[in-house]
Image: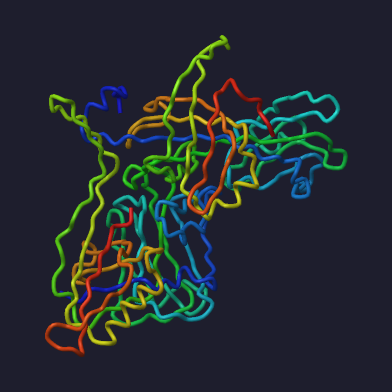
Amino acid sequence: MGLSLSDWAKRADWIPQLILRVEPAYALHRVKSDWTLEGGTSYTQWVDHSELGKPNNVIFCSASDGSISTWTEVGSKGAIETTNDSWFYETSSGKLYFHADAGSWSGGLASFSWVYFTNVNPEDNLLVIDDKPVRELLHDASLPDISQSISDFYLGSLQLDLGTVSLNADPSLDEWWWKYTWVRKRMDALLGGVGGTYPDDFTTIWNGWTGKLVWTEEEVRIDVTDLREVTPFV
Amino acid sequence: MKNIRFLYDNWFDDTATTITASSEEALFPKENLQDYRHKEFWQSTGDSSEWIKWDFGSAKDVKAFVLKFHNFSAGATVKIQANSSDSWASPPVDETLSIVSGQMQKMWDSAQSYQWWRLTMEDSGNPDGYLRVGRIFSGSWSSPSVNFDWKRPWSVITKAVSRDSTGGQRVARKLADNKKLWRYRFGFLTASDVAIIEDVLEKCGRHKPFFIVEDADNADNTLYYVWLLNESGDFEPSDVMHTRFAVSLDLEEAL
């Protein structure tokens, strides 16, 4: 739209749009029985990844020494067979292909994917990000107040207290809360306005990590922790 | 002017209904067409020859078809078709729909009783390169024999926050698009008319939005997707005849 956030906010009909971006993990090694070997191949496995869409990363953790490695995204599923430690997401089918020998598999393998939530998403300006839905599940008061503090003992920087975010409980997503891992995952809040283009017209207002998740009939509450407080967990 | 029509009994949502589509993006599957939230949509992979087809399992009486939320361009050709079998060379129902922004409809005065239905969409000039449809209604409509006496003109809810300085300068912010409210007052309903409204209360209550057409003679402009706000029917005897009944229905636009 060509306006800075502050310029745009001066217009009285500006409708602020918050985007909550969370990056849950899908522990693929825990659903190994669902791996399907692509016909005519020996190492090209796939799993249904249509709920989360294209991952940001696929990460392997060695069972022998705990070392972590980020696998490489390749340009086609055909390239998986001959490329060790590779993956490919097929948009039309929602399948995540990856290179693995299921028979001798050991270790952890997880995909990490952004999912998006917002507070307002009118149909005449419907926001879709990277071909993924932006679900309108944030209530007006669902983002936390932010407070800053400095410990008596210098710990390197300001500590942010980011409270808890809450999403309206969508029954069609119930399965997500146990199927994917939400604890200690990246979670960012971005502010822009309805009609804006993502990401150019949105400003990050905080980067956090997910803490405890509480799931009730009405809402899903996710504690937000400071980026420096946690260790990633799959 | 025709009497108000309630479109709430949607065969499309029935568990016996099987939906297929020419194509779909994995993140926007055809099952989204049964989601009452029209912004949870189906998206095709192409735009030149797409279709959505549904099989009711047996012939059903259909008097209305509504499509809510789409991205069709003005040049699109969109048809609603029906047949007693999965055959589309010359179906007995084959209606071309007018392209209307936001929502489109076709209503029949008599029931079209067919098992197989199909929506065809050709829109090769669509700038998106794909097609989106949010919600489909394919069912009957019911209408009271006596129309509403009056309706409150649209009332609009504006969601905004504001706060004044000591000097009185206001800082304000709009939080969402405006939302419409309606109130329809029925004053002379028969027992059969009451049964229709009670059926709406029973099947949709306050948990499921439905469509109304305020005047079928101007259906494109008086078709609304609404939530019912009433907690109960609260019917009263009519002021002028105690075998007739009165009730007010409060409705809120489903955004």
Q: Nearer the viewer, residue B77 or A9?
A: A9
Q: How is the image coloured?
A: rainbow
- Closer to the camera in the image, A227 or A107: A227
The residue drawn where x is 26% and y is 27% is A9
Drawn side of residue B215 relative to residue A227, left or right: left
Residue shown at 83% from the left, 39% from the top: A101
Say above or below: A74 vs B196. Answer: above
Relative placement, left or right, of A95 versus B128 is right
Image: B60 above or below A4: below
- Place of residue B41 in the rendered image (x, y in percent of width and height, measured from the top left): 44, 53
Residue at position x 22%, y 26% in the image: A10
Q: How many marks?
A: 0
Nearest to the observer: residue A218 or residue B209: A218
Quadrant position of the N terminus of chain B in the picture = bottom left
Image spot of residue B83 (x, y percent):
45, 77
Dividing the picture into quadrants, the one containing residue B238 is bottom left
* Residue in the picture at 24% in, 63% down: B220
Residue A225 locus on image (x, y percent): 55, 28
Q: Say above or below: A151 vs B204.
A: above
Task: Pick out the residue farthest to the right.
Answer: A104
> Percent position (x, y) of residue B111?
35, 81
- Which quadrant holds residue A62? top right
Q: Quadrant of residue B153?
A: bottom left
In the shown orientation, is residue B139 left or right of residue B99?
Answer: right
